[in-house]
Amino acid sequence: MLARARLMFRSTAVRLSALYILLFALCAAFLVFYVTAMSERLLAQQTRQSLQEEVSDIQRAYERGGINLLLRMMERRARQPGANLYVIAGPNGEMLAGNVASVQPGVLDDQGWTDIPFTYEPYAEVDRPGRHLATANVTRLDNGLRVMVGRDLGDPSRFRGIVRRALMVALTIMGVGALVIWFGIGRNALKRIDRMSAASQKIMAGDLSQRLPVGKSGDEFDRLSDSLNAMLGRIEKLNEGLRQVSDNIAHDLKTPLTRLRNKAADALDEDREEVRRVALEGIIGESDQLIRTFNALLMISRVEAGSIAAEMSEVDLSAISADSAELYEPAAEEAGLALTTDLESDLVVNGNRELIGQAIFNLLDNAIKYAVGAPGEAGREAKIGVHLVKRDGTFRLSVCDNGPGVPADKRGEVTKRFFRLDESRSKPGTGLGLSLVEAVMELHGGSLELSATHEDNPEAPGLTVTMVFPEPKP
Amino acid sequence: METSVHYSAATANSDSAKNAADAIVPHMKILVIEDDLEAAAYMTKAFREAGIVVDHASDGESGLFMGTENAYDVMVIDRMLPRRDGLSVISELRKRGVNAPVLILSALGQVDDRVTGLRAGGDDYLPKPYAFSELLARVEVLGRRKGAPEQDMIYRVGDLELDRLSHEVKRAGKDVLLQPREFRLLEYLMKNAGQVVTRTMLLENVWDYHFDPQTNVIDVHVSRLRSKIEKDFDKPLLKTIRGAGYMIKDEG
């Protein structure tokens, strides 16, 4: 319980609301002081105004009725409840009449408004004994008498006291309210975090299909959960892909390993030296094929990881294409294929010559392999071609054949690792060639396009694979 | 007609017995620095069967010591070694003035590693896993016990003559017309006459691409070349070594 409370007070919500309350209290205090100061000034102004009026009344009364009228008027006014302070003093300052017992010495000497509040003792008052603060106006009459009209300052300071007490009460209520709200918010936030942690625990335990709870409010917690869930979805998909690949690898390696094992078993049983030698050579051939498959896999993952990117330089696509065509021309001819080229010259990209070379070789290997097996058609010559053109800000290097082609719905899949159109795997190959080409194109910021060479010939549409390089910025 | 010779210890030994040059030059002596003891044992045994004297070191420090103390014709150095990294062994050897050719073996084995390996002072690079025939062929070419010296302007194998300056090829005095690429192919084969040259080595040295050609592209080029230099003559010169590559040699 205590630990939980401590946890709650460490939560961000609580810290933030504490900060808000502190700021709010400061603002409120400032406001209250400002308001009281303003009202005091207003009160003082009003006091002066009313005192000024009384002074005028007194002067008028004196002018009209002399000292007698003045005394009568003062006596009447002094008796009223909450009356002002009145003093009539002689020329030397001796108190002659009024409702004040004594004033601070010197107050009656200067004419006009007193600069600062002064002390006085009220006359014959029991309920408010002691010294009081007051402000006053002193006038000198023509006969030398001094008349003081003043007002006790007890009211404004009482007013200030009331306002400040109200402020204290308000702040206390605010503090208590904040504690209650903290408790509510903190507990709610903590509960949601706990639910998220619980879901994360399950995910960590291996259940990638779990998702974090998302509420309906769309607040920051929900937004966080939403993006974490999107991330989990992506991870799950990648994980799925990875499992698919490793399933494929396991499947595609199991078959040659089984063959290898069977051949070794046969060789072991064989007595005739010649047959045994052939079997052993077969075993070496199978092993080499496996090694090639592993090398190709490693190569693809390294290209995909981009770790080869360090060795980029200017590569003349035109020269590489011509080289590749020259390298493959005899092999094509031997397979009974005509190899044609149509290459635009001096197309240069920034890239890795070895990888681009290997990618083209893979495409040419495929073209020769599949064009050969094309269904024979009278008068149709099996041929392959290498083309390089500059178009729409891209360099398009394509290798085409007029073999059986790839159905449009399978074109997205042939670049997947170990995917082979021919389920029986009657043609030799690792099923990794196009995967590497695609990885190489991604490394070079380009793409790979597959299309039919002859759309109009459903018998042998052929396949054109185009490596699309972005034209380098000058 | 295609002549096939199975490349084995037996043929290698009988070859050297027949070859006068081999009688004068003693056996090649190499140093293998490899920490995988099983791989090292296999390599050592196979090299010895091919008539090569082998010393073995199993870590970088002792390899560096042996390479500095003894004179070797070729050193085969694994890239990842305990106590001292393979590349650092090579650069230290070069600093100490050891100029024996070095072949780097690496499990990292791809384009960029090859470049860094050669920059560190290696002469050749072979990614793991490799076929032993490939390693043997490369070590023998690096050792250059056979074949034509670099400065020779005319290569001769039997009655076949190749002029590196005029780019003329003659067999028994008769002109043989070759395409530029075929000329370079023959030039490389004759430079390493009497030694096995693998398909990968041909792709590297004639076409300047560094990977394993997985199809018969190189074979077709070689058989075209063969038909040009052997068609009208009885004696075959260009042999196919099964499971390894090619060799040009005058059987005498």
Image (cartoon, rainbow, N blue to C red):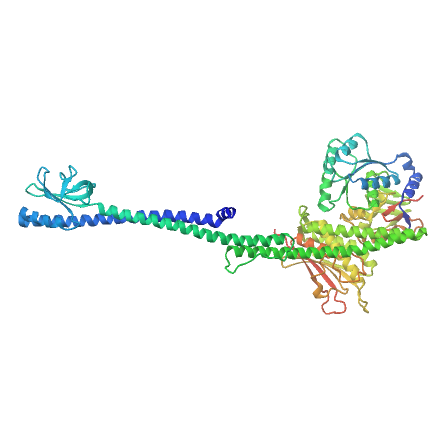
Tally of numbered discs: 0
Asked whether, in this view, residue B92 is left or right of residue B29, the answer is: left
**Which residue sits at x=15%, y=39%?**
A103
Q: Out of A273 and A139, give the one closest to the viewer.
A: A139
Q: Out of A322 and B42, give the one closest to the viewer.
A: B42
Asked whether, in this view, residue B103 is left or right of residue A15, the answer is: right
Q: Is residue A432 visible?
A: no
Asked whether, in this view, residue A27 is left or right of residue B10, the answer is: left
**Which residue sits at x=81%, y=69%?**
A377
**Residue A93, quarter of picture:** top left
Asked whether, in this view, residue B36 is left or right of residue A107, the answer is: right
Q: Position of residue A237 (x, y in %)?
A: 65, 57
Q: Position of residue B123 (x, y in %)?
A: 77, 40
> Where is the C terminus of chain B found, in terms of image quarters?
top right
Q: Is residue B6 visible?
A: yes
**Which residue sits at x=28%, y=46%?**
A161
**Residue A322, quarter of picture:** bottom right
Name the residue furthest top. B69
Q: Out of A170 and B10, give the one closest to the viewer.
A: A170
Q: Position of residue A193 (x, y in %)?
A: 54, 52
Q: Position of residue A90 (x, y in %)?
A: 8, 40
